[in-house]
Image (spheres, rainbow, N blue to C red):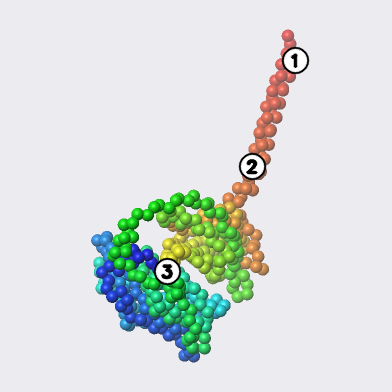
Amino acid sequence: MEPRSPSPACLLLLLLGASGFFQSYAVEVEVKDASNTTCLYAKWMMKFLIRYETNSSDYKNITLDLPSNVTHDGSVCGNDTQAALVALQFGEGHSWSNNFTKNNETYQGDFVTFTYNTNDTALFPDAKRKGPITVVVKDNMLPVHLNNVYVCHNADSFETENVVQIFWNVTLQAFVQNGTISKKESRCRADTPTSAPTVLPTIANVTTASTSTLSPAPTATPKPVENPDTGNYSLKSGNKTCLLATVGLQLNVSKDKPVLININPKTTSADGTCGNTTATLRLNDGNSTLIAFTFVVKNTSVSVPKFYLKEVNVTLLNHLNGSVISNADNNNFSKWDTFLGSSYMCRKEQTLEINENLQIHTFNLWIQPFLVKENKFSTAEECFADSDLNFLIPITVGMALGFLIILVFISYIIGRRKSRTGYQSV
């Protein structure tokens, strides 16, 4: 759990009125495997600073401390293929979890998920939005050797739009070997000798910062974003390939101002499910984007049914602090349809409208989610945009021939008229 420190101004907004900043209960989790051997250990302190809207449309700031009675149901050991998970439940419907993945000789945090429940009227009196609210944050923890314990004494934080998560006195080891907590330590950045000491904001220093006049930075002309690289993705069912996809992907995020983000196929992994009538391809770029494409088969009663793209789900994380920029879903598509047993191809750029703030641009698309044979694409049906290229040449040639015929015909008529004029009697 290695987060980024929030800005002092944002912290102050949430800390005003809070007393005893570091007064919180420590939580300790020890997970054991089927043989009653310790496989995961964690002990740390944390608290949450939350800003919420009231029914009168103003905003209140509260501090959520860990109580003494915390449960950790659902925590799992993990292995080479399954992530380890620390899961907590506390208070009136609040929960927190962090999962850890193993990669060769190291492990590291993946995503931190925090859910707070505004139905807890003691914490959120007069909350306008009722019910659980979930915040997902990318964990920036550096890789730790498998036989090392991760230690971070200094306070560090995750900051999202309305929530700041603060951690300190962290001791953690995922994928414990031989049931024994290691004595070798890997320290966080905040504990390194060169790191600045933790300084909590005060009214004085924030006021000074807010009244200072900063010179505007020169505006640089943004460089145009190039088309994305084309990636090759596949899924297997047993030993057989069941889905093939070749595509370049570009996201267009326009919540505040349009931002184009290319998906890098070199850092993107694919997983999903294959079925007789439904298939899902999930792409994870390992940094900030999760995309899921769902295909279905329609008209199963006919001799040769068709498949098409029905749903696209996108979870977009801010690569700077891991906060969720967008979690969008559109399940009403009817795109990329062709006959079952064939593949669909579109070399030209296409646009998928996920919602008003998010689009996906596809390039060099070639997809076959069903009935893949011998790990190869079947005969492709090309999109209309590609077909335009095939029609353009014959249409152009036909038009040229038409004009030529018209010119010849006009010349012939003029020639005949001149000929008749020459034989008239005087």
What residue appears at the point 49 percent right and 51 percent down from the top-left corner? 222
Spatial separation of the CA atoms under disc 3 and disc 1: 100 Å
Mark 1 residue element:
loop
Decide: is 382 above or below 377.
above
Q: Amino acid at mark 2?
A: Ile
Which one is closest to the eye, mark 3 or mark 1?
3
Q: Tell me: 299 left or right of 327.
A: right
Decide: is 229 above or below 190.
above
Q: Residue 240 occupies which quadrant of the picture?
A: bottom right
Q: Residue 239 occupies which quadrant of the picture?
A: bottom right
Quadrant position of the N terminus in the picture: bottom left
Please state the horizontal and vertical placement of residue 310, each as a whole percent of the image: 50, 61
User: Of the residues under marks 3 and 2, which one precedes in the sequence?
Assistant: 3
Which one is closest to the eye, mark 3 or mark 2?
3
Decide: is 238 above or below 425.
below
Please state the horizontal and vertical placement of residue 285, each as a whole percent of the image: 53, 66
- Pointer 3 residue: 4
Please state the horizontal and vertical placement of residue 161, each as a whole percent of the image: 37, 64
Q: Which numbered dot is residue 395?
A: 2
Q: Is residue 1 visible?
A: no
Task: Tell me whether circle 3 and circle 2 mark residues in contact (CB < 8 Å).
Answer: no
- Pointer 1 residue: 423
Mark 3 residue element:
loop
What residue appears at the point 52 percent right and 86 percent down from the top-left corner? 177
Q: Amino acid at mark 3?
A: Arg
What residue appears at the point 53 percent right and 61 percent down from the top-left corner? 263
Mark 2 residue element:
helix
Q: What is the residue that sits farthest to the bottom in this orientation? A: 35
